[in-house]
């Protein structure tokens, strides 16, 4: 009986440790304002302070002018603040908390740990940038899953990427 219980516990643990899952962003204003230029990043990846800095200076959004009207900016900021990793307690939020807080997703210890050795993948023509999460995590925007699919990359490139 103990062996059966232990086996069941191990199977359950193995099944649930696969890839973390973020809540899917469904806010139409956020999808429109952010998704017009890039994928809609899960707000659980950064703190309130980071989102305030990023969204509060859209005229200099990582070197680009991403300005929107004041009402849209306020709505987008409000959504991100209510769902930031230092506010929500979903499993992914807890894993993405950083001390000290970071102001870019790619600087988060979680990102660095998960993407160690992926420099060649980031340079690949189908990925191009660290910000193109959906190149390797195709279901992120639809289901929130970070499960990766690197089949499109040559084995010499994908085999060096960090953990899943």
Image (cartoon, rainbow, N blue to C red):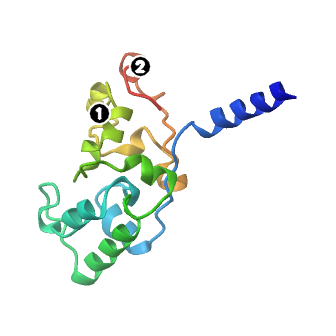
Residue at 81% of width from left, 25% of height from top?
A: 3
Image position of 79 with respect to 40: above or below: below
Q: Residue furthest top?
A: 156
Q: Which of 32 and 125 lies nearest the eye of the viewer?
A: 32
Q: Residue furthest front?
A: 2
21 left or right of 110 in image = right
78 vs 96: above or below:
below
Name the element at disc 2.
loop
* Residue at the right extreme of this rendering: 1
SS class, disc 1 = helix
Question: Which mark is drawn over residue 20?
Answer: none
Residue situated in front as seen by the camera: 19 or 140 = 19
x and y percentages locating residue 91 in the rendered image: 51, 51
Q: Position of residue 66 (x, y in %)?
A: 19, 66
Q: Residue 53 in the image: x percent, y percent?
A: 19, 64
Residue 8 location, quadrant? top right
Q: Which residue is mark 2?
A: 159
Callout 2 crowding tier (Cα within 10 Å): few <14, some 14–19, many ≥20:
few
Q: Which of the image's four quarters has the N terminus?
A: top right
Label 1 crowd bin: few (<14), some (14–19), many (20+), radius 10 Å: many
Q: CA distance from mark 2 to mark 1?
A: 13 Å
Instruction: Name the residue: 17% across, 60% down.
Output: 61
Q: Which mark is residue 122?
A: 1
Asked whether the viewer can see residue 42, the reply is no
- Asked if residue 164 can be seen in this view, the reply is yes
Instruction: Using residue 58 as the reference point, say whether residue 23 is left or right of it.
Output: right
């Amino acid at each position: 009986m103990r062996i059966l219980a232990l086996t069941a516990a191990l199977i359950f643990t193995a099944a649930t440790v696969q890839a973390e899952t973020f809540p899917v962003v469904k806010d139409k204003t956020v999808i429109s304002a952010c998704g017009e230029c890039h994928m809609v990043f899960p707000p659980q990846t950064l703190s309130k302070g980071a989102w305030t800095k990023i969204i509060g200076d859209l005229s200099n959004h990582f070197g680009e002018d991403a300005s929107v009207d004041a009402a849209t900016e306020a709505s987008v900021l409000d959504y991100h603040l209510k769902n930031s990793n230092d506010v929500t307690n979903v499993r992914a939020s807890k894993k993405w908390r950083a001390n000290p807080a970071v102001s870019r997703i790619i600087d988060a210890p979680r990102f660095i740990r998960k993407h160690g050795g992926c420099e060649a993948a980031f340079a690949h023509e189908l990925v191009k940038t660290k910000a193109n999460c959906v190149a390797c995590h195709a279901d992120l925007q639809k289901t929130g899953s970070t499960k990766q699919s690197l089949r499109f990359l040559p084995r010499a490139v994908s085999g060096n990427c960090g953990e899943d």
